[in-house]
Image (cartoon, rainbow, N blue to C red):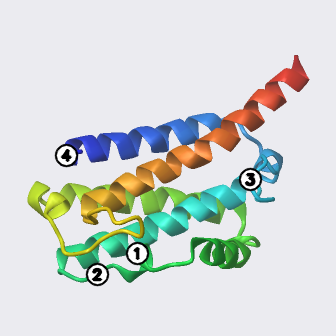
Amino acid sequence: MNKPELIEQLNAQHRHLLGLVQDFSKADFEQTPAMSGWTIKDIFAHIAYWNWEAMKAVEQFARGERPVMMLDVNFDEINQRETAARREQPLHKVMQDFHRSHRSLAALIASESEHELTKTTPFKSGDDKDANAAWIVGGIIEHYQEHLQPLEEFLSRSTSKNS
């Protein structure tokens, strides 16, 4: 994917996610949509955390460094730790962080040259794929998509109950 496609896909997934919850009440954000016992608020806090980590990784790639956080991690352990750390944050803080993390990541991608985003690096992902900044952003796009599914299922169940 080239730079404009990365930015458009990232923004499209962000809009889609927000569109799903645009009519949610605070109580709706406290619902558990079938994802490891996480509330919808937890999902947004989780995505924000990984957006910030993706920014760090893109910046590390730009400096020619190996982004340890995105390549050598136990995702389950980090997800548990970071979800617990953010669980007590008020919803408005979680959503501010979610919006800020997305805008910051999109701005960083926009500021990088196409070459910097897509250049070959000596780094490999855990599944032996070439890892570069575009690979990181592609992973974040997939991450948004991964969390859309439980929200869509939750909405579908909620809509069918109200019918």
**Comes first in the chain, label 4 or label 1:** 4
| Point 25% across, 65% down: residue | 132
Which residue is label 3 attached to?
Answer: 35
Few, some or many residues within 10 Å of mark 3 (<14, 14–19, 20+)? some
Structural distance between the alpha carbons of marks 2 and 4: 21 Å
**Comes first in the chain, label 4 or label 3:** 4
**Comes first in the chain, label 2 or label 4:** 4
| Residue 71 badge | 1
Proximity of marks 3 and 1: CB atoms separated by less than 8 Å: no
Q: Please tell me whether mark 1 sits on a helix, a strand or a loop.
A: helix
Q: Please tell me whether mark 2 sits on a helix, a strand or a loop.
A: loop
Residue type at numbered disc 3: Met
Which residue is label 4 attached to?
Answer: 2
Position of residue 105 measured from the top left corner of the image (x, y, whole percent): 35, 61
Position of residue 127 measured from the top left corner of the image (x, y, whole percent): 41, 64
Proximity of marks 2 and 3: CB atoms separated by less than 8 Å: no
Residue type at numbered disc 4: Asn
Residue type at numbered disc 2: Arg
Structural distance between the alpha carbons of marks 4 and 1: 22 Å
**How many numbered marks appear?**
4
Of the pair 75 and 98, the residue shown nearer to us: 75
Structural distance between the alpha carbons of marks 2 and 1: 8 Å
| Point 73% across, 35% down: residue | 153
